[in-house]
Amino acid sequence: MAKKRPLPVLATLTAASFQLNAAELPVGIEWISNNNEPLFASENALRGGTYRTYISSFPQTLRSVGPDANSGLRQYLMDGSPKLAQRHPNTGKWIPQLAKSWAFEEDNKTVFFRLDDTAKWSDGEKITADDYVFMMKYYRSKDIIDPWYNDFFTNSIVRVAKIDDYTIKVNLAVAQSHDLLMVMINMPSNGFQPRPEHFFDGEKDANNDGMPDNFVRKFNFKAEPTAAPYYLDKVKKGKSVTFKHVGEDWWGYNNRYYKNRYNVEKVRIKVIRDPDIAMKHFEKGSLDYFEMVLPNFWHDKTDSEVYKKGYIQKYWGFNEAPQGAGGLWMNTAMPMLDNLEVRKGVMAATDYDGMIENIMRGDYSRKPHGLGFGHGEYDAPNHTPPKFDADAAVKHFEKAGFDKVGADGIRVNGKGQRLSFAITYGYNSWTPRIAYLKEQAKLAGLEFTLNLVDGSSAFKYILEKKHQLAFLNMGSGEVPAYWEYLHSDNANRPQTNAHTNYSSPELDKLIEAYDSEFDQEKRYELSHQIQNYVSKANIIVPGYMVPYSRVAHWRWVNIPKDGMTKATEWVLHPMDIGNFWIDTKVKEETEEAMDEGKTFPETTVIDDRYKL
């Protein structure tokens, strides 16, 4: 599985990495808890109800690590699962999750955490320091077949030591600011979360690394106990999965920041492959909410009676979430795309701005750079995305030898090669977008063909480096990660995020310097240099960004007033902010009103407090 590696470094492993009781607390350290930050849920929230939603394809695994683990359920199994601490979604301060408090050692490499001693796994077992010590064995094991986590928990997180049952010491390889240390440990996708050693007791471990030898196969559809509020309850392969709330005694409700969140009792997720069909299920009342990010749904398909009569309501909330790398990734290992002039031509011939205006109704925004946006001073100033310019593209293509035009209008070179590339993408709803790019590219004599690969299989196809061009946006943390995308360690290797297969010794040096730099101002400058280098390499056409959450929901689904936060990406996703609830009495009222022909006011809520 490919994931982010924010601050990779080299480190030497010793047997001390797994010592249990060698660590001691320094005298006089200052414990931090930040327990007085504003709350972001409503005391009016009600508990209960079954929340019905859908995914477009059944996940290829229920593991959170290993092959194919970047599935549609990853938010439930990894990213949304509690870490030691999290950013407050509005103030940005670190607030408790599985840790009650934390402290820093003077070396700027070491963080101590006091664990919440009420925390339990969903199977009732206590979560202790031993589960974090085991976590290191888990992630370092070759049996999980996940090079990214093998590397991160070897060369970035170098040691986790138990001080007592509810206190741990975490050593990182490189000195960083206190804030960056917390980012490294608590970024959701980095996976620093306890792992249940008791769950794997009795499994065959011939290589004696602490993990089952057949982990990937045996646990492909066998979910681990979780610290999260929802555990996997039922699986109907190919059809649906159901998550169930641990209950009122979930340990998290001892934490003030978790109160009045994660309110529904069950989350039932059906497989519905086509969003148009899913919308019909939604409007018939079989689903409780529907994502309306797609402009044609929001603008063209919400004027039916269920909306006009107020049974279904609309919500558009803006955020300030960082935007990840993405757009059109060029696989430089493919013929012709290894030529810089060809890539410059593709850059100029790809009309994202026209697509946003004509297909996306102007709702989306353009990323200024292919490596993302919204990272503060990490982002190089004055970046602007390339404008569509067919004439400029032609000049680049001619320099690359594509100086003739065939009868079909597509350029060819002296070898008879046509200037043609397939764009790989994962959802049929994106087809009009790619089709627009295809028509515009013809103006420069460039052919784009459409390679639709269904759902999660598309990302697997891209991870295996089979694509020529990939239409893809990646997620992002608050600190840009470059190693996973651009370092030569990952180029031309399957199951990595090096979607362009591009690397160079000079770029490697910049990335390594960035990852190991302690001085924040120097780190910002290195980030700018990396972004500028990538711009000159012409390997990612900057794509679009969607800085909001937009949904339709039945009126029994309640979003609190000011329900959005700066960090909310999916306001009605059960494992995002999770501050919504189902009012079963309102559901009964609504169903009776529909039977009797009664109506309610048509409702659209727009929360633009955080609009960029």
Image (cartoon, grey):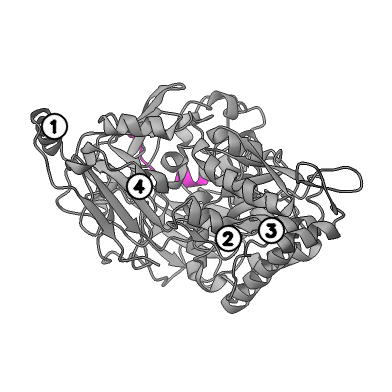
Position in image of residue 158 (x %, y %): 60, 55
| Crowd around label 2: few <14 · some 14–19 · many ≥20 (10 Å) | many
> Relative to 287, is 277 on the left or the right?
right
Residue 130: within the magenta? yes
Three-letter code for the amino acid on which mark 2 is drawn: Leu
- Image: 118 above or below 504: above
Residue named by callout 3: 347
Mark 4, mark 2: which one is toward the viewer? 4
The answer to the question of whether label 2 and label 3 lie on touching residues, with beta carbons closer than 8 A, is no
Instruction: Please state the extent of the stretch shown in magenta in the rendering.
Output: 123-133
Mark identifier at residue 131? none
Q: Which mark sits nearer the N-terminus, 4 or 2?
A: 2
> Could you say which is closer to the camera, residue 312 or residue 514?
312
Residue named by callout 1: 594
Q: Which mark sits nearer the N-terminus, 2 or 3?
A: 2
Mark 4 and mark 1: span between their CA atoms?
23 Å
| Crowd around label 3: few <14 · some 14–19 · many ≥20 (10 Å) | many
Mark identifier at residue 298? 4
Mark 1 and mark 3: span between their CA atoms?
52 Å
Residue named by callout 2: 172
Q: Which mark sits nearer the N-terminus, 4 or 1?
A: 4
